[in-house]
Image: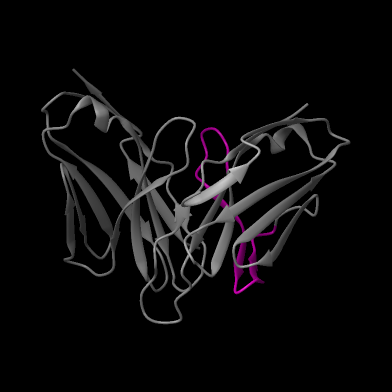
Amino acid sequence: ETGVTQTPRHLVMGMTNKKSLKCEQHLGHNAMYWYKQSAKKPLELMFVYSLEERVENNSVPSRFSPECPNSSHLFLHLHTLQPEDSALYLCASSQDSPGLYSYEQYFGPGTRLTVT
Amino acid sequence: EDQVTQSPEALRLQEGESSSLNCSYTVSGLRGLFWYRQDPGKGPEFLFTLYSAGEEKEKERLKATLTKKESFLHITAPKPEDSATYLCAVQRGGADGLTFGKGTHLIIQP
């Protein structure tokens, strides 16, 4: 496996279900991100982890719960979602830099989530 | 609050017809401006990073430029395989998340 992988690629869940999205990066990076992409809207940042610690939470509802057990893996746990949560969920990774410049983020293929 | 506005929303060109996509931004302390390409059903694919006004980068038929308020993605003699949505994003640095524009949906007709 190379780059950033995400599983599953497609997920249909009911509003009362609990499911998890998985992301794995094979790039040796130390920062990982979750983004949400809805139709007609820009990609929205949800969570940022750097060195396995959450550093940013963009006011995301508590029905979304991230977990980063190590620098290569990132999970998004889902429970009691709403139909408006249907979207493409994208994971990304990058090298964290405390210096002046930023490193590019590399994205996975995404998980297409449908909440019924 | 960081803001990124891309124009036009959609652009249809004939093969070989050059054009430019615009990305206007407002950000406190820009650390990097990024261009991505996204094909339907896929994640964004990294194209360029620009760090300071006056900087330019090129890759095949694409050239990205940066001023203090906007960035342009110039497409020279495009081919049908250049059809995609092009996304612009800004970052304030470190492991900050990216703030994206809505993208420009580009169609190149043979």
Q: Quadrant of residue B50?
A: bottom left
Magenta-span inclusion, residue A47: yes
Provide residue A115's location: percent of width, then percent of height.
75, 31
At a point 44% along the width and 72% down the height, the residue shown is B93
Provide residue A112's location: percent of width, then percent of height.
62, 34
Q: Which residues are drawn in magenta?
A: A37-59
Between residue A37 and residue A21, name the one nearer to us. A21
Total marks placed: 0
B55 sits to left or right of A27? left
Between residue B37 and residue A7, name the one nearer to us. A7
Magenta-span inclusion, residue A84: no
Say above or below: A30 vs B21: below
At a point 40% along the width and 33% down the height, the residue shown is B39
Residue extending farthest to the right is A16
Provide residue A89's location: percent of width, then percent of height.
61, 43
At a point 36% along the width and 34% down the height, the residue shown is B9
Say above or below: A19 vs A70: above
